[in-house]
Image (spheres, grey):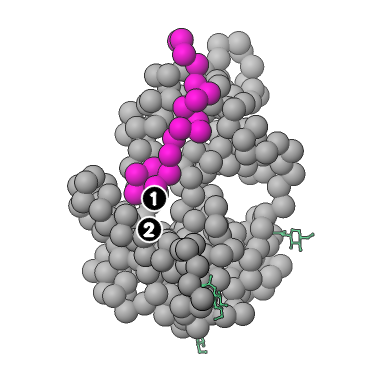
Amino acid sequence: HKSAAKTVDEINRDRLFHLRRACESTNNGGKYTIESSFYIHVKNESLLYCLVFKSGTTTWFYNINRWAGISEDTILDHKTDNFMLARMKYPWENPRVLLTSMKNTYSFIVVRDPFERLISAYEERLLGQLHPYFTNLSHQIYTRYHDDGNLFGIPSFQDFARYVVDQFRNEKPSDLHWRPINDLCTPCLARYDSIIKMETFARDVEHLANRTNLHGKIKPVQMNHSRRDSVDTLIEKYFSQLTKQQFDDLYDIYRIDFELFQYSSDKYSQFVKETT
Ligand SMILES: *[C@@H]1O[C@H](CO)[C@@H](O)[C@H](O)[C@H]1NC(C)=O
Ligand SMILES: *[C@@H]1O[C@H](CO)[C@@H](O)[C@H](O)[C@H]1NC(C)=O
Ligand SMILES: *[C@@H]1O[C@H](CO)[C@@H](O)[C@H](O)[C@H]1NC(C)=O
Ligand SMILES: *[C@@H]1O[C@H](CO)[C@@H](O)[C@H](O)[C@H]1NC(C)=O
């Protein structure tokens, strides 16, 4: 029986095809050398993962660290740096070795709508205040844009957006949780077998498991956020704080991510303030 709906395999092939075309039209996303820091080569499973923070890393850190024999308690302890743990078990590969690995393994990336990722980073890191480092950063961002003497203010989304743009303009490295995917994984210089999207995560992971030897070996894990508002409510709440200029400046930073992975900024731009 052949249905009109595309299979997950066809959808994946469309994503890979689109990525190749978008890479051509953006000059490889403006990149010349592969960024290898965020790739994890799981040799035992012949799997190569490029991790995008705020995009499915909870599930993948859980599984790759479990496969390496690390206890569940350690992995789920919020004080654990799972990236560092994974790096001890799966050593960094230099760019030349990495490119060879890509040819011989099942290679994948997990992506997400760029501005949903940004909202998630803002809420978890700056509002959530779970880590002393981010509590401090949160107050610093507030004092940078407010002259009211409050040293413990919480930045609005607009403050955060201005900060992201200012850091970018000043060529300061951006935090991994909101660094563009194009800068984290240089997808135009990589070779992937799967592009997994957060929006269709369970289905895409099942497809990856079907294509590898990982059936029954991938456990989905979710962070338990106490988020009250729906994504649509948050989009309106946050993007209505931005002026047209602020929105355009922010979009410029993430434009290539939008293009490479077929996301649209329309659902955000509709809320932006018309006047400044
Ligand atoms: C890979 O498999 C070998 C043999 O089973 C095991 O000794 C080793 O710990 C595994 N390595 C990782 C990183 O899981
Ligand atoms: C916050 O960060 C600033 C700048 O990095 C640093 O000077 C300051 O000591 C930090 N404060 C705390 C409480 O960690
Ligand atoms: C995975 O394989 C199973 C069994 O062959 C199949 O029923 C299922 O549709 C596949 N899922 C995906 C997402 O490819
Ligand atoms: C989230 O909550 C569920 C159900 O209470 C639990 O099984 C799971 O381990 C929790 N996830 C994390 C990452 O703590």
- Is residue 212 toward the left or the right of residue 15 in the image? right
Q: Is residue 35 above or below residue 219?
A: above
Q: CA distance from mark 1 to mark 2?
A: 7 Å
Residue identified by numbered label 2: 15
- Disc 2 crowd rating (10 Å Cα; few below 14, some 14-19, many 20+) is some
Residue at 29% from the left image edge and 75% from the top image edge:
103
Q: Quadrant of ligand 3?
A: bottom right
What is the span of residues highlighted in magenta in the rendered image?
258-276
Q: Is residue 26 above or below residue 151?
A: below
Local packing at callout 1 (Cα closer than 10 Å; few below 14, some 14-19, many 20+) is many
Relative image position of residue 34 (x, y in whole percent): 27, 58
SS category of the residue bearing label 1: loop
- Looking at the image, which residue is at 27% across and 57% down? 20
Q: Is residue 40 visible?
A: no
Picture coordinates of residue 239, whole percent (x, y): 54, 26
Q: What residue do we see at 32% from left, 55% from top?
A: 18
Residue 92: image x %, image y %? Answer: 38, 67
User: Is residue 261 a member of the stretch shown in magenta?
Assistant: yes
Task: State the mark number for residue 229.
Answer: none
Compared across the picture, whether 146 is left or right of 30 comes to right
Is residue 266 covered in magenta? Answer: yes
Q: Earlier in the sequence, mark 1 or mark 2?
A: 2
In front: 187, or 75?
187
The yes-or-no answer for disc 2 within 8 Å of ligand 3 is: no
* Residue type at tag 1: Phe
What's under tag 2, amino acid-wise? Answer: Arg
Magenta part, dominant SS: loop
**Rendered-image quadrant of the C terminus:** top left
What residue is shown at x 31% (from left), y 59% (from top)?
17
- Indicate whether 32 appears above or below 39: above
Task: Pinpoint residue 130: horizontal percent, then vertical percent.
Answer: 67, 43
Disc 1 designates what residue?
A: 261
